[in-house]
Amino acid sequence: MVPCQRWKAESKRTSVVRLTLAPESVMPAQRLDGRTLAARLEGVLAEAIRHGLSVAGRPPGLAVLRVGDDPASGVYVANKEKACARVGLASHGAHLSGDTPQQELEAALRQLNDNAAVDGILVQLPVPDGIDDQALLQVLDPDKDADGLHPLNLGRLVRSEPGPRSCTPAGVMALLKEAQVPLSGARAVVIGRSTLVGQPMALMLQKADATVTVAHSRTRELAELTRQADVLVVAAGRPGLIGAEHVSPGAVVVDVGIHRKAEGGLCGDVRSAEVAEIAAALTPVPGGVGPMTVTMLLVNAVRAWTRRYGLPDPCPGL
């Protein structure tokens, strides 16, 4: 674990801990590398599975229910299947046509709930128009909810109770922990209020004793607000929304967005080239939050398997 050596804690009269650049620092932002951490965690999961097979008699199983033929979803599902193969999870699930009736989709989920070889289930979002994704999520067995989106699991998060956590926010927290970012007393701003990322992200930061503000599309004077942040998490879904004018020197910036540019390549919600000259640390796009989202999906599935057979938690503290 390599801490950001250029950060220092500076106590203010308000007793809020600010993250500031050390005076001698002129280097660009440290890269918070999700690929490297994800690979290390995959190794931890693979080892846990190898050790647990003699007790469980089978590997953990992850099932993905994909509906329709959204190209991006196809890529995501293929990446998840490759990740499962790398660590030793068995892949299950189904790919159903976009015109499959709601009742049939819910029946398919119930079959996965009842499948003893399946420990984690993911409904691949988005689903086609006309399908009630919230109703699908409520059909899930909460203990097999690999993406942490069942209402019961969101409630468990609010109450600080054990349970699967939403994968992208959990991946962000793992990155911050790996970099030893001090969150207790820090000011955090989350841009985005979705139940997939923004809301659980804010809750997780609060649980780490940060003081959290959630901004969104109707927030006034956004730059004035974000410049107060020690930790800025951007999940707005708007390419290039955040630039140098939004970031205070020494802030930690986490870019959750990922978009395909017209000229080719990918970008995030943050204008990374200019923010990198101001921030203490920044997640790259690609290679930052994305790999951690997939890895935390695996963590949720393997944890469900270890709980089922009384095995040790493979990733305590995450």
Image (cartoon, grey):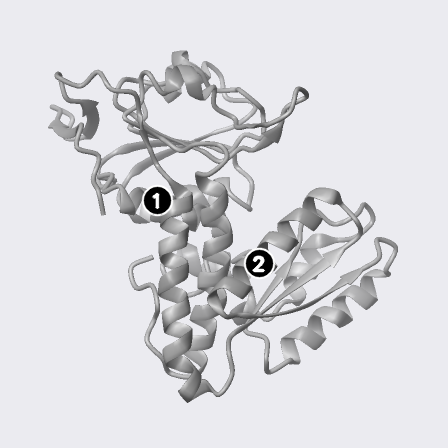
User: Which quadrant would residue 102 be assigned to in this image?
Assistant: bottom right
Residue displayed at 41% across by 60% down: 42
Q: Nearer the viewer, residue 123 or 91?
A: 91
Position of residue 99 relative to residue 304, above or below, is above
Three-letter amino acid code of the residue under disc 2: Lys
Residue 129 falls left or right of residue 292? right
Alpha carbon separation for disc pair 2 and 1: 22 Å
Position of residue 46 relative to residue 151, above or below, is below
**Which quarter of the rendering shows the C terminus?**
bottom left
The disc, 2 or 1, on the residue closer to the chain's N-terminal end is: 2
Residue displayed at 51% across by 33% down: 235
Residue displayed at 12% across by 27% down: 10
Residue topped by disc 2: 82
Residue 19 appears at what percent x and percent y? 21, 28
Check disc 2 and report its element: helix, strand or loop. Answer: helix
Q: Nearer the viewer, residue 243 or 53?
A: 53
Q: Residues within 10 Å of mark 2 (few under 14, many from 20)?
A: some
Position of residue 184 relative to residue 158, above or below, is above
Residue topped by disc 1: 175
Residue 230 appears at what percent x and percent y? 28, 28
